[in-house]
Every structure is written in C-alpha cells, then in structure tokens.
Image (cartoon, rainbow, N blue to C red):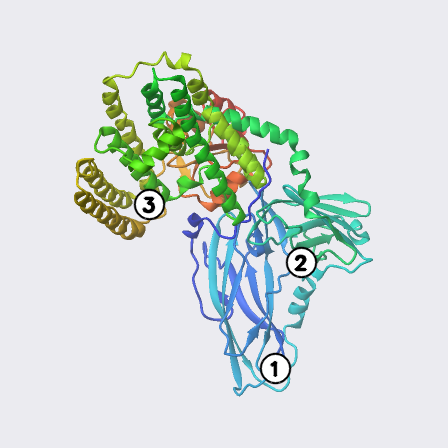
Amino acid sequence: MVVTDMAASRALPIHLLSLVLALVAFSTPGAAQVYEGRELVQAELLTKTSAVVPGQPFLVGVRLQMVPHWHTYWRFPGDAGIPTEIKWALPAGWKTGEIQWPIPLKLSEPGDIDIYGYHDEVLLMQEITPPAQLTESTVKLSAQVDWLVCEKICIPGGTTVQLDLPIAASASSANEDLFDRFQRALPQPAPAAGAASFEWTRRPTELVLQINSAVLANHAAVDFYPLPGEAVVVGHPTAERRPDGVTFRIPIETSESKLGSVPGLVVFGQTAEGAERNAWELGKNTQGTSSTLKAAGAAFAPSVATAAGGLTKALLLGLLGGFILNLMPCVLPVISLKIFGFVQHAGESRAHILRSGLAFVAGIFAWFLGLAVLLILLQRAGNQIGWAVQFTNPYFVLALSAVVFVFALNLFGVFEFNLPQSANRSVIHVTGGSGHLASFFQGLFATVLGTSCTAPVLGAAVGFALSQSAVVILLMFTAIAAGMSAPYLLLSAQPAWVKWLPRPGVWMERLKQLMGFPMLATLVFLLYVLGEQRGPIAVIWTLCFLLVLGLACWMKGAFLIPTASTRSRVVVLVLLAVLVLGGGHYFIREKFAETKLEIGARTMTEGWQAFTPAKLEAELAKGSAVFIDFTAAWCVTCKFNEKTVLESAAVREAFERRGVVKFKADWTNADPAITKILQQFGRPGVPLYVLYPGGKTAAPIVLPELLTRNIVLEQLETIAPRVAAQ
C-alpha cells in the first residue's frame, strides 16, 4: 500500500540537475530551451499598460508557453519540482510586488506523486510601482526568469526577458484580454461570515479543516492545495463531502507544537481541471469570521490515549527490535568486545559482576537517550531525521574512525588509559571497583556501531516514534535500549551462567591483543564508508591524521608512565597537544574539508541504475516492473543483503527473466530526495526494499529489512507475465 507522501521537495535531486540542457537568450520573447529540436518553454515579458506614468503602479506579466504535455510549477510544487522564480533588475527607486499565481492544476504522477503546476500557458503577474519623479523618456524593464519544465524527464531552464516602455503623463491599456483572463484565474480571499465558516482541528499527525458552505456543496470537484511553511511537511490532503460542505484531512509533520492551520487554496469547480474553477485563499490564520480553532492542548491531549494501542504495540516492537539488534551484522565487529568484557570478570564476586554489567548497560542507555535528544532537537529545528542520521555525516564517521583506531592501539598494548589519582578515587567510589568505567564505554561504543543499521522489527517502531511527540521518541529509544541491554543485564545478574565462561588467566592478555584486530577490521569498514562519502583523497588525509594520532598514542604509552618526572610529563603533554591539534587542523580542517565526491563518481553494479524520482516515474509510466534498493555504504545489513541475496545467481536471473528495472537509492550522504521517500514508507532509515509490480495503479510491495532469496523470488512471482514479456 502506498504511504501518503509527507515531504514537499523544494529542490530537484542533484542527479536531475545534471540534465541541464537550457540555452540562455537575451531577447523578448526568450527562447530558453531546446530539447529534441523543440523549444520547451518560451518566456515573454508583457505589460497591461502602453506607457509608464510616474508614481502610478502598473501590472507586468511573465508569460510562459510550454509545448504540449510539459508543465512548469506553482509556488508550492508539491511532492517534486521547483517553483518558477523571477528576479528583477530595475532602476533605483522602483518597487515590485509579490507574484500573483493563477490557480494551478493538480497533476498526479506515477509513484503516488502529486504536483501542482501549469500546462500550455501561464501568466505570472506582478505590480510594479515607479518613482513619482522620472526624468528619462523610456525605461528598460528586465528580469531573469528561471523554471523547471517536466514531462517524463525534468529540465531546468531560464532566460532574461526585457521590455522597453515609454514614460508619459498618461497611458492606455495593453494586452487587456490576456491579463483579464489570468486575473480571473487568481484565487479570491476567503468569504466573510454567513457565506462560509472554517474550523481547524489539530490532531497528532494531521490537520482537519471543516468548511460549512453551500457554495462548495454545489460543486462536483473540491480540493485543498496546501502552502506549507519551511518547517512544515504536508502529505496528500483528502476530502470528505458533506451535505453542508466538506472536510479536508491534511497529513503533517512539524516541530511547531502550536501550529493549528496551514495556508492554502480551497479549489472548487464542476471538473477538477475546468477553466471555470475558482479558489479561496486561506492564510495561515484564516478562519473566517464565524470560524473556530480548537485549542492545541485539546488536540494533543489524546495523542497517547487515543493511540494507546498503537503506542503500546510500537514500544513492544522497539523492545524486540533492540534485542534483535544484538544479532545484526552491524554489531558483529564489536561482539568480541562484549564477550571479552564478561570473560574478564568471570570468577569474581557476584556484586562486582553485577556492577560491571550495570555499567555496560548504562553505556547502552546513555547512547540511545543521547541519540533521542539529538533527534528531538533536529526535529524541532525542522530537519528531516532518521535512525542512523549520525552516519550520514562524514565528520562523524571520521571521528568514529579515530576512536576505533585509538581503541585498537589500546588493545594491542601501545598505551593504557590512566586517569589521575583523584579521578580514579572518584570512579572507585562510584562503581565500587575498578574497570567499570571501561565497561560503560564498551557499552557506549558497541551501541554507536550498532545503530548504523535498522534491525528487523525496529524500523517500523522507530518510524512510528519519529512522527510523534518528544515524549514518545524518548519512550521508544528507552524501550530499544532496554531490549538491547537485556541479555547483558540478565547475564550479569546470574553469576551461575557466568561461571560457564573461561576463568581469567595469562591467556587474557593475548586475547585482549587479538581483539584489536576486529577493531582494525571495523576501521577498514569505516574508511570504506568515508571513501563512498567523500572519495579516496579524503581517505588518504584521514589516514595521515590517524598516523599522527598513532604517534601520539605511542608517545603517551612510552613516556607518560608513572615513573616519569613532572617536567617530562609536561613536555610530552605539550608535544601531544601540538601533534594532535596541528594534525587535526592541517589534515582534517584544511585538506579533508576540501574533498568532495563528484556526482556520478560511484559506479553501479551491473544491471543497476542510480535512482531518481524522475526515472521511477518514467519506468512506471511505461508499465515496467521496478525494484528499488534503498541502501548506504555504512549499512552492514544492506551490504549483507546485497551480497547474499540481491547479487545471487538465482535472484539476478529472476530479475532479468521478468524484465524488472533495478534502481539503487544511495542514502550514504542522506540525499534529501531519498529521505523524503523513506518517510513516505514510514521508515526512519535503510535498508528498505520496494517492488513495484508494474503499471500506474499497482501498489508497491515493501519487503522485510533482512532478505532471503525465497522472499525475493516469491515476490517476483507475483509480477504479471505480461510485464515480464515487455
């Protein structure tokens, strides 16, 4: 089932921008684009006056004429697209008003994508006010116009439009029929009391607009076109007709807790695209004279109570997902550390083992609750958030690489972590013994690496939480932490189980050194992620910084020893600071920061194409079956599924035999277009696997996060033979 789109893209994916075929002209009309021998859009600057009268406002309009089947976009483009922009270059003292946008068309594209735009022709009007004193005899009006025009593909275009007008004491009308036609197509203000009433109600994930109006009740086609602000993400509004009016339900995501309405157009007519359509424009606080807005507190109060069943189920899924997270491939590189921590304490007192286990569990909770707070802050700032948002930041991956490298050197015995005596006494006092601080950081460290993927069951639970209030997000991440830490808490609370582990001995030093190699393997993986995010040059500069960091660790182990004099320790500390800070400044702040992976630098595996929404639309329009692999370089589960399932001979043969078009949606750097689609399917992160059986109306099939060949093959069997034959 297609999930309602919850994002309003205001910029094209960068892949589409590579399709720029626009030719810039400097005349009026402007022939700005040529594609397959056709000028897709012609732009022309027109006025409703024959001359400029000093001090008197007049209307100008940019007319865009599109070839058949191509469209440009409204001020809010919907699920994809870019609005047309007009940037004026007028003499000093001249003023321009806002663009007057005619009522757009609502266009439904394959893949459950709704956009708002214009076919054939549109006139974007603005009022220009000249100064009261003008000494020139003529004036040149000039504007840069930029647009996006789409059909099966999208092509940005632009041109400069110009017009010379005389300056006179009086003027007559010009282009009157054209301006009057598009002025009649402008939305009107909301009617006064008596003609209609508007009532907004805020619910946890939607706004409800109830309109009582005999006018709307008499029209066959009624719709709501939203105009959300930057901090509001809207889905597809739905309408419920009533004898006395209509009720609109508008899905939303926002960090604005007091938001009670969104601006937009109430569009109505006898047909959805008829020229006779009208529209009422509702501002952010437009409620009509007789309207009411239900209190925000009343709207939010039932959010937990009314969804108690859903919340309880989601928390249980979070608990189960946290437990399963221990078994995911993402966590395997650090499983050895967890086991080693318990082996290290085997044979000790029950109280000591319990305290060590509690410290380990505290590290798990510290990371999950810290991550929850971070996501809440990002959500309140209006950002798109996800489960593994930290791994989409190359600087986080770089910092984690440094931590892993230092951790490995510590396991090899290059240096030891030594706290000052006062700090040691504090730790001993709090934990009741030695080594518990290390247990805490082991739990924290293991969890940091573990959140780079979404375990089965966990995706739906986290996706639910990220669309809820801050309290629900905290509850969900607490449940996940409890699920992940349960095995270790249980093991540390039952010494009878710990006794089955080997007793401590000399062999433990060798085992400790051996555990350094999984850390280096983790480092190799993180460097691979950096390479995918920023390219091989970034990896080189990261290795240079790690070399400096390794030297600093060796100096710490060799010279900062208990027998060293105070003077020696001060000198070494100064050298360490110079090395680390200097290396970080040169290799990271200067060299690493300059690196950037060029678009298209990543190569696709044979048979796969880089995903863009436009490519998906084109394939669905042709009736093709489509499979999308939403993946990321840092997602070990994704790589596991790709190597063992998607690239297996049986699955590859099934894809080819049934003519399935395969797209790879790379979320390594948190591509906003991909983030939006993940949100459509209620997923906070990757992996996500979606199969479109073919055709515009067929609902997409969402596969589990952890794939098997049988799962994929069974779903491919559902594709109609006629699609396979295409």
Relative to residue 434, is residue 66 drawn left or right? Answer: right
Callout 3 secondary element: helix
Which residue occupies the foreground of this view, 636 or 717?
A: 636
Could you tell which of marks 3 and 1 lies nearer the N-terminus? 1
Label 1 crowd (10 A; few <14 / some 14-19 / many >=20)? some
Quarter holding residue 357: top left
Locate the N terminus by quadrant.
top right
Callout 2 secondary element: loop
For the image shown, how many numbered marks are present on the structure? 3
Taking the spot 17% from the left edge, 43% from the top edge, the residue there is: 568
Q: Which mark is residue 534?
A: 3
- Disc 1 marks which amino acid? Gly
Taking the spot 36% from the left edge, 24% from the top edge, the residue there is: 338
Q: Is residue 605 above or below residue 150?
A: above
Instruction: Point out residue 157 in the picture as x, y percentages from the top left corner.
Output: 47, 59
Query: What's the distance in space between the residues labelled 3 and 1, CA to CA?
Result: 55 Å
Instruction: Point out residue 388 in the picture as x, y percentages from the top left corner.
Output: 44, 37
Relative to residue 709, is residue 536 drawn left or right? Answer: left
Label 2 crowd (10 A; few <14 / some 14-19 / many >=20)? some
Mark 2 or 1, closer to the camera:
2
Taking the spot 65% from the left edge, 29% from the top edge, the residue there is: 309
Q: Which mark is residue 55?
A: 1
Q: Which residue is mark 2?
A: 283
Could you tell which of marks 3 and 2 lies nearer the N-terminus? 2
Mark 3 or 1, closer to the camera:
3
Instruction: Point out residue 675 in the picture as x, y percentages from the top left corner.
Output: 49, 42
Query: What's the distance in space between the residues labelled 2 and 1, CA to CA?
Result: 30 Å
Callout 1 secondary element: loop
Query: What's the distance in space between the residues labelled 3 and 2, CA to CA?
Result: 43 Å
